[in-house]
Image (spheres, coloured by chain):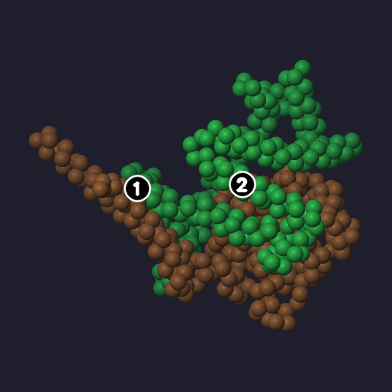
Amino acid sequence: MKRNLPLIVAFISGVVILVGGFIPRDPFPRIESTLIEWFMIISGFAILLGQASLLRMNVARVAEKAPNWQYYLAGLISFGLMLAFGLLWGMEKTPGLLGQGQGIVDKLGTKPFDYLFENAFIPLSATMFSLLAFYIASAAYRAFIIRTFESNLLMITAVIVMLGRTSFAPVLTGWIPDQLSWLRLPELTNFIMQYPNTAAQRAILISAALGIVGASLRIILGIERSYLGGGK
Amino acid sequence: MKMPERSVVERRIVFLLLVLAVALPILFPLGLKTQSTPLTEQVYGLVESLPEGVPVIISFDYDPSTITELQPMAEAVIEHAWKKGHKVIATAMWPQGPQMAEIAFKDVQARMERKDAAAKKHPYGEDYINLGYKPGGLVTIQGMGRSMKAIFPTDITGQKYDEIPLLKPVRTLKDIRYVISLSAGDPGLRDWIMTANGKFNVPVAGGTTAVSAPGFLPYVNDQKQLYGLMGGLKGAAEYELLLGYEGTASLGMNPQSVAHILILAFILFGNIRAWKKRKADRLALEAKNG
């Protein structure tokens, strides 16, 4: 029963939503609305579950003094601080348990949560993302090597698109006469993006969509059961 | 002292050059201008085409990691919408989206006042509203198609949906004249295209990071599944150009362009090195075989 009940729920929910897509008459829209509400509530709980799991994992690492446990401790302290500030004084327009915290706002210029969000979280997140540039630069030097005809083709396309998307592109090829304007880098870039790229992306999208249909049917019919957990 | 390996030294040189390529154009701007492309012009055209007073949604489907590319887009689109007198409803499919929206609204208001001290104030609840974050992506948007109030019973301040003047004419997603999703991944623009446009026929436009923009181009088609697309920092810079001001995206295009050229140079050097190594290996093999 423990295994069959989720399968039955998945089957009924899947079939109702599927049929509702073709028959927009009562009771299907009503059931669909209810299921949507349930989905949102469950999604809310999933966030809570995620936070609980994050806490448990980090606390365990710190307690065990696992390698680099100091980072997990820093994560826990940050988590606790943001949670406490958010709960006590809320965010810019949202009041917290202690109201709007005017006294603190007068001192900091903003609420503590917003202060940390704008001055710590945003710069740190942007820094993490921008580190990608260094990996790309390093990979460009060591790994983008032309070996075959296909890699040659890929490289030429990449060079055109990369150059075409810089502010140098109009300067580099602006001298080309109007009759041959299609040879200018921005135009060549637009052509590559609009035709060969779109055609390939469309093919990928269609195959992915067919894959999703197949995977969904497998879940609805109970063939695919990995989402139940248990490793089987 | 042990000398680091050659590959480590090379990597350090690559990193140092990249730092210089980004830092120098920030300190000494090159004054390069970007050119607008049809994709960004279509987004601009959609906003431009609608009359004053219409309710529109700007969805903040990103977090601070992509702020460099998406926040300038958000600011440009908000400024354009406000200039046209559109009523902006901010939603978010990502948890940190509402804060990104708040920062964008505040910065746009400040910039407009800096440009013109007599610039119109845009009061919260009348010209714009922030409905906050809702999980669920595609399913949430489907729910908005049935009832906006059911999905967003209050705004981020806790004010009830019915008490907000701006939201009076908005019962469902179908009352919205366009949706612009600024999207860093999933859930995001694809969900808006599939549901808001596919199911409820609401015009959808978007802005994404440069790396994910090519994946959305198939949706820009004759059926107008997507009304144009702003791709990365360049897309944001193009929108700023169309609005007639130089913001953070336009300024950011200089270091980005130099960094792109540098990466192309790295590819070239890497290939020359590989070619030389292959040649040396071949000669060594020939010498060995006599």
Which residue sits at x=61%, y=64%? B72
Q: Quadrant of residue B260?
A: bottom left
Q: Position of residue A173 (x, y in %)?
A: 41, 69
Identify residue for label 2.
A77
Is residue B12 among the parts visible in the rendering?
yes
Residue sitting nearer the eye, B100 or A226: B100
Residue at the limit of the structure toward the left, as seen here: B290
Q: Residue at x 53, y 44 (%)?
A: A71
Q: Quadrant of the C terminus of chain B?
A: top left
Are there few (<14), some (14-19), or many (20+) residues within 10 Å of tag 2?
few
Q: Secondary structure at mark 2?
A: helix
* Residue sitting at the far top: A1
- How far apart are the alpha carbons under marks 2 and 1? 39 Å
Residue lying at 85% horizontally and 51% vertically, measured from the top left:
B153
Query: What amino acid does circle 2 point to?
Result: Ile
Q: Colour of chain A?
A: green
Residue B70 at x, y percent in the picture: 60, 59
Residue A177 in sight from this viewpoint: no
Chain letter for mark 1: A
Residue A178's disc is none
Residue behind mark 1: A142
Q: Are marks 2 and 1 in contact (CB under 8 Å)?
A: no
Label 2 resides on the chain identified as A
Q: Is residue A90 left or right of residue A117?
A: right
Locate residue B102 relative to residue B274 in the image: left or right: right
